[in-house]
Amino acid sequence: MKGRTKQRKDVNESHCSLSWEKLKEMKENQVEFWAGDGFKRLRIVELDEKTKCLHLICQLGKITWPLSYQKLEKVHRKIHEGEIGLIPYELTRLFQPGEIILPVC
C-alpha cells in the first residue's frame, strides 16, 4: 500500500516508548508480548550492545535469529508514518527469512 501518508490514529508516536533502553527494561523484567502475527508470545533473551541486535524466545522455547535494532526502528517509523499497516503480511515482507517481528507500541 505505497503512497499512504496519513498517520494512523491508533498508533500515536507521542505515546510510543520504543527505545534501546525500553528493550533492556523489557528483558530485565522478562516481559512477554505478542509477535506481529498475533499468534506467538515472545520474550527478549539477549541484547547485544556492540551490534545493537536482539534475540527473542518464543513460547515453544525456540530462540530467533538476531534482529537488528536499526531494522526494528525503520519498520517502527514506517508504521507511524502510515507507509505500512499493522498487518502481519505487510510486516513480514520487510524482514529477511529467519527474522522475527516485534510489536510496535
Image (tube, helix red, strand yellow):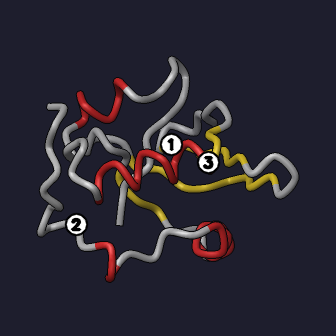
Amino acid identity at mark 2: Val
Is the residue 7 above or below the residue 97 in the image? Answer: below
Residue, x 81% and y 46% (percent of image)?
A: 51
Residue 89, quarter of the rendered image = top left
Amino acid identity at mark 1: Cys
Residue, x 14% and y 31% (percent of image)?
A: 1
**Residue located farthest toward the right when viewing the structure as drawn:** 50
Determine whether the residue tagged by mark 1 lies in a helix, strand or loop: strand
Is the residue 27 above or below the residue 100 in the image? Answer: below
The image position of residue 30, as x and y in percent, is: 59, 68
Amino acid identity at mark 3: Gln
In the image shown, does 42 or 23 lie closer to the viewer? 23
Instruction: Tell me the residue that label 1 is attached to.
Output: 58
Q: Is residue 52 left or right of residue 2?
A: right
Indicate which disc residue 70 carries: 3
Determine whether the residue tagged by mark 3 lies in a helix, strand or loop: helix
Given this view, does label 2 or label 1 mark the residue nearer the observer?
A: 2
Residue 10, quarter of the rendered image = bottom left
Q: Is residue 2 left or right of residue 41?
A: left
The image position of residue 99, as x and y in percent, is: 54, 29
Residue, x 33% and y 81% (percent of image)?
A: 14
Q: Earlier in the sequence, mark 2 or mark 1?
A: 2
Instruction: Tell me the residue that label 2 is attached to.
Output: 11
